[in-house]
Amino acid sequence: MDLWAFFTASLRKMPTPLSSVVDFVREMEISRHMAPLQDPLRFRARFLGLEVANVLVDDQGHLRLDLVQQLLETPRYLTGPFLENDAFLLDHLFSSLRSLVENPPIRHLLQRFSPHVCHKGAERLIRDTLWPHSPQKIQDADVKRAVLAAWFTWLRQTTGSCFATAPAILVQQQYPLQFLQDLFDLLTFGSLRRIVSGQEYSVPLCPSLEQADLLRPLVDQEHSPGLKAAFAAAGLKHWTPVEASTPKELIEKVLLQSLGLELDDIKEEENLKRLEMNPLLAKQSAVYYQRPSDRAKKVAEWKEKTDLACTAYQALGDCALLRAWEATVASFTDAKVDIGRWNLYVSLGMHPDQPGGIGAFLYERINVRLQAANYQLQSLQIEYDSTVQQARQAQRLGRESEYRSATYVLNAIVEQSKVLSQEAQFLSKLFSETIQGYDRLIPQAFQEIFDPSLAQNLESMIDDSPAGFRLAYKHGRTASSQWTFIRTKEEFIASLREFFAYAEQELNLEAGLTTDLIQYIQTEEFFKGALARCKSNPAMQGSIAKPWEYISGGTMPGLLMAYCNRSQPFTSLERKIQNEAELLQFILEAKGKDPMLMHSPTHAFILHPEWLPETPSLHDFWEKMEVREPEWLADKLSNWLPQKDRALFLHRWRQHTSISELKQFRQSLIHSLSRPDPEAFVDSFLYESLPLIDQKIANSLAPLFDDQPFFTPVEVRERLKTLSYPFSLSDIDEQIAAELRKRGLAAPRPILFADTNWSAGFFGLAFSPAGTFDLWRFNRTGMSGTPMRHWFHLQRNGTWIILTRPQEYAL
């Protein structure tokens, strides 16, 4: 049975208010081919949010409330094949639509959005959000559609930003008025502002969006909808596959090939451009306009087309405005009022005890002058004492002229001493006052800002909470669009030169000292020392730290305190967890009906205590499980493998004997695989495939099962759902799962307790086919999932924390 063909046919035959404005047939056709390069669920979330936003705002920018009411009459559940997690997408959409109808302040705020946004970067965000229908000139309707699309799109984590994604999900879903106010501030003013430790702290609209999808390992390039959209945006209808490791590298190589360029051409043109921009060369000779060469024109075209292609690829699976807001909120995790904690401050070496740093350089220069002044004072004192003796002797002997001469010399020495003494006093304070002045000016001139592109190449990013931060130089301007977001050594040194020249005027410093300092920061000695100080900073992930960018562990409580203008710690439960049973006991103590923020030693997520059963079932369903038709099951598992690995797996498996018991059968499958973590892979397969349901029992549920002798529980569920295609008023997935469990035809419902933030992933506890009680990542109904033994092992003996009073971080 072709479930997808049956589902799309039912969509055409039985339209609903929602399917009349959302092209679900097109959505499903694209979605089916997204994996593994891109996430199908994130694509459907973005597609749904954008399509609805586009029809709810007319071309004059007016909200169509009559259509909102019609959409709310649509059945809530989409019952297509393997779409059980889409219930969350539709639930979020309908919840947002109800808020739009029932909350007048939301509608009033929406009307305040206008096309007069803060800068070009904000305009680009709006265009990228509305892709593929990106307007050339931003109109009132475009801004409102982009804002609604960001609100209606179900937010998921993509890189290691869990410390920001978890609270961001809560804000978007639970506090939509605050979410929309944030978007208004970002698009209008270019920043979010909060009060941190009694001081205003501002974070600018995130200057760069992550490129996680572009950097995934490249497979199946010929069928990817994302690559087709990318090359279409660049004007290519057909392309020849080339060897590449990521989609981004493929896009770059194909476009180079289409323009007759090579990578060396790009590098040479960039070097020429740097030479043209060199201020020293510009001063040495007259500058004449030169017509760009043919190669330069092609390189410029390549860069433009590459940007268009990468934007299209990313836009297919992500809402740009929503992702920019999430990344901007993430900057609050590093809201440092204490300048001494800044990576920049550490790299500059402001303390005089740090060799090669600015502090040591200034201290040495000032100390040389101070010692010289003190030496001169000592010399003058010796000369003064000697001259006093001469004057006294001349006075005794009545030598008036000698006495007057000595007195004149003494007065001159006194005047010189006064001048030198004042200079010594000035020099003795100069170092501390200069450093204090720099301390005051650095936060005004620089800011360290979250940059999601920095952490996206880290391995196991989903398991940790790394946060990438980039240094920005403000040039004395408040508009972040005019800041320099430093990415190279040259930009870093240029920003320091400009800052110290500005500080000389602001602090009324001596020109000579500043000149020496500016010359010093351009030396290799200073730069190597700055790199070394960054890498030795224990607060940073030192291997990739630079003075202008670094990776640091993001903390959710720190972000929340800054974002919520809170000065006191949150009420919390804390526990060191050693096993899954202790984790279950811990989450059962967090009673409540509202979602709560929670974090393990390396991951922040959302606890849902309302999902927890009053009396959790801990029955081991697998203890007496018999394996029927092992050959049929092994062949079924082989279909989960890449085509090239299937024959070898089956050959190895068939060497095993005595595999009628589950334990033996499981081991035979594990030993026949050549892949990472085969235990988790096999348990995931067995969990959703056992017990096998024969044809007669399956047909007793509905006469739909005459084409094969056996069916897995998931296959039975998917066929039964065809009776309710395409929409349902009730949760058919959950109802079928409950019925199968009631009849003993599926594993018991796991103890689901949290949203992981990851796509289609919910934390749950259950007995595994291995016979152990484990932490799993399940789909919504708990019929499919993956055990997380390795991940949980990394969390053991660490502190788990639940922020138990959601009203403390309510907005």
Image (cartoon, rainbow, N blue to C red):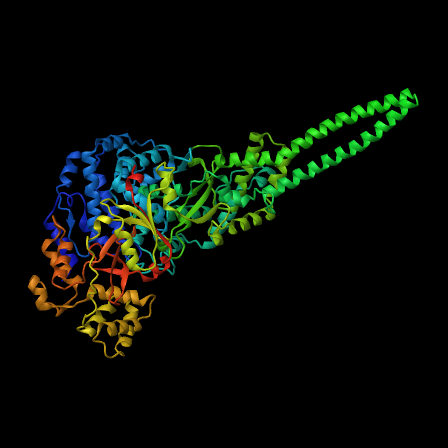
Give percent across and percent down for residue 579: 32, 60
Give percent across and percent down for residue 523: 60, 46
Camera-nearest residue between 680 and 716: 680
Residue 676 lies left or right of residue 510; in this view the side is left
Give percent across and percent down for residue 184: 32, 34
Residue 304 lies left or right of residue 56; in this view the side is right
> Where 73 falls versus 627 (above or below)?
above
Camera-nearest residue between 686 and 42: 686
On the image, which quarter does residue 278 sit in? top right
Q: Locate the C terminus by quadrant.
A: top left
Q: Give the total of numbered labels.
A: 0
Give percent across and percent down for residue 25: 18, 51
Camera-nearest residue between 154 and 131: 154
Residue 466 lies left or right of residue 586; in this view the side is right
**Residue 157 visible in image:** no
Residue drawn at point x = 47 percent, y = 50 percent: 540
> Where 227 falls versus 360 (above or below)?
below
Q: Locate the N terminus by quadrant.
A: bottom left
**Residue 736 visible in image:** yes
